[in-house]
Amino acid sequence: MNTFKTIRLRQYIVQAIDRRTGERITDTVAYERGASLLLGTYDTDLTDAINRQFSRKGYQVTNITKGKCCTSYVELGSLFNAATAEQEG
């Protein structure tokens, strides 16, 4: 029996400066729609989470822009098999 889950993803375009080299970068990250709701329970928001994520990598975020939104249907059995194969390999 196949079990499917509907996920809604939101793309964010992040512009940042590498603190080590001063080089400007543009990167794209995606979060599931429910992530922003979950972060709200921890008294933080998505922009804070993105800033922390890039700061840990040595970047200073200068701008975050919302990008596209899409819906995807994921078969959970296949996702589980891929995840376990990745961990073993």
Image (spheres, rainbow, N blue to C red):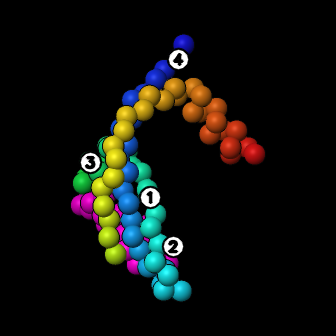
In space, the residues marked 3 and 2 are separated at their CA atoms by 25 Å
Please name the residue that numbered disc 4 is placed on: 2
Q: Are marks 3 and 2 in contact (CB under 8 Å)?
A: no
Instruction: Give the residue at the far top of this rendering.
Output: 1
Front residue of 55/61: it is 61
Q: Earlier in the sequence, mark 3 or mark 2?
A: 3
Label 4 SS: loop
In space, the residues marked 1 and 2 are separated at their CA atoms by 14 Å
Q: Which residues are magenta?
A: 42-61
**Residue drawn at 46 percent across, 78 percent down:** 24
Q: What's under tag 3, amino acid-wise?
A: Leu
Front residue of 37/64: it is 64
Instruction: Give the residue at the far right of this rendering.
Output: 89
Q: What's under tag 2, amino acid-wise?
A: Lys
Q: Which mark is residue 55?
A: none
Residue 51 lies in what quarter of the image? bottom left
Quick one: label 2, few (<14), some, or many (20+) residues within 10 Å? few
The x, y position of residue 87, in whole percent, is 68, 45
Label 3 SS: helix
Q: Which mark is residue 57?
A: 2
Does the magenta run of residues contain 45?
A: yes
Q: Is residue 8 above or below residue 46?
A: above
Front residue of 83/65: it is 65
Q: Are marks 2 and 4 in contact (CB under 8 Å)?
A: no
In the rendered image, the quadrant that contains the N terminus is top right
Q: Earlier in the sequence, mark 4 or mark 1?
A: 4
The x, y position of residue 61, in whole percent, is 37, 74
Question: Is 7 situated left or right of 81 in this image?
Answer: left
Q: Which mark is residue 37?
A: 3
Q: What's under tag 1, amino acid-wise?
A: Thr
